[in-house]
Image (tube, rainbow, N blue to C red):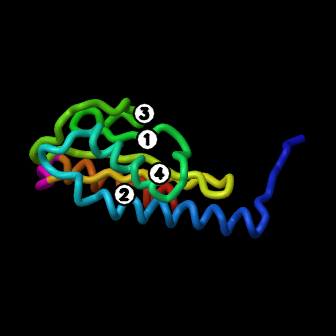
Amino acid sequence: MRNIQIKTKKELANLRRAARITARIFDEIRPLVTTGSRESDIAKAIERKMAERGLRKAFKTIVGSGANAANPHAPVTGREIGVNDCVMIDFGVVYKKQRGDMTRTFIVGRLPSRMKKIYRAVQEAQKEAIR
């Protein structure tokens, strides 16, 4: 027999709040993600924003760029973001025992045509999986 747990209305509200806070922090740090920025500086900025709100991180913050962006659990390094690099950011906050979680992957610069093809293939696979 499976142990199924269902969140209360209050827990769901807190989960939504954790997600909104996480999204707001992402919006605040997004302008810092530019060519020449370091993964470690971006991760520190994210965690500083959490601390300013009196919150703790839900899990280890991940900022990966270039080849590091391909690793879903990439350790944060001092790597500088290069021209047309792919960047992956994964983080979340704990709000009243509920954990927000956000992963965003994007390009700093222009998306090379080869990567556009890959992006479209992944997007189509995702749409098919949802269907």
Indicate the amino acid at tag 1: Thr
Circle 1 packing at 10 Å, graded few (<14), some (14-19), many (20+), is many
Distance in Å between CA atoms under marks 2 and 3: 24 Å
Q: Residue at the spot x=41%, y=55% of the render? A: 49
Quickly name the residue at label 3. Answer: 73
Q: What element carries label 4?
A: helix
Is mark 4 in CB contact (under 8 Å) with mark 1?
no
In this picture, is 21 found above or below 98?
below
Q: Which of marks 4 and 3 is nearer the N terminus?
A: 4
Is mark 2 in CB contact (under 8 Å) with mark 1?
no
Q: Quadrant of residue 78?
A: top left
Quickly name the residue at label 1. Answer: 61
Quickly name the residue at label 4. Answer: 51
Q: Nearer the viewer, residue 27 or 86?
A: 27
Position in image of residue 99 (x %, y %): 60, 52
- Dominant secondary structure (helix, strand or loop) of the stretch shown in magenta: loop
Which segment did they paint magenta? 109-114
Q: Earlier in the sequence, mark 4 or mark 1?
A: 4
Q: Earlier in the sequence, mark 3 or mark 1?
A: 1
Q: What element carries label 1?
A: loop
Distance in Å between CA atoms under marks 2 and 1: 28 Å
Distance in Å between CA atoms under marks 4 and 3: 23 Å
Position in image of residue 33 (x %, y %): 23, 52
Task: Check residue 10 for magenta coloring.
Answer: no
Indicate the amino acid at tag 2: Glu
Indicate the amino acid at tag 3: His
Is mark 4 in CB contact (under 8 Å) with mark 3?
no
**Going by the image, does 114 lie left or right of 22?**
left
Q: Which residue lies furthest to the right in this view?
A: 1
Quickly name the residue at label 2. Answer: 124
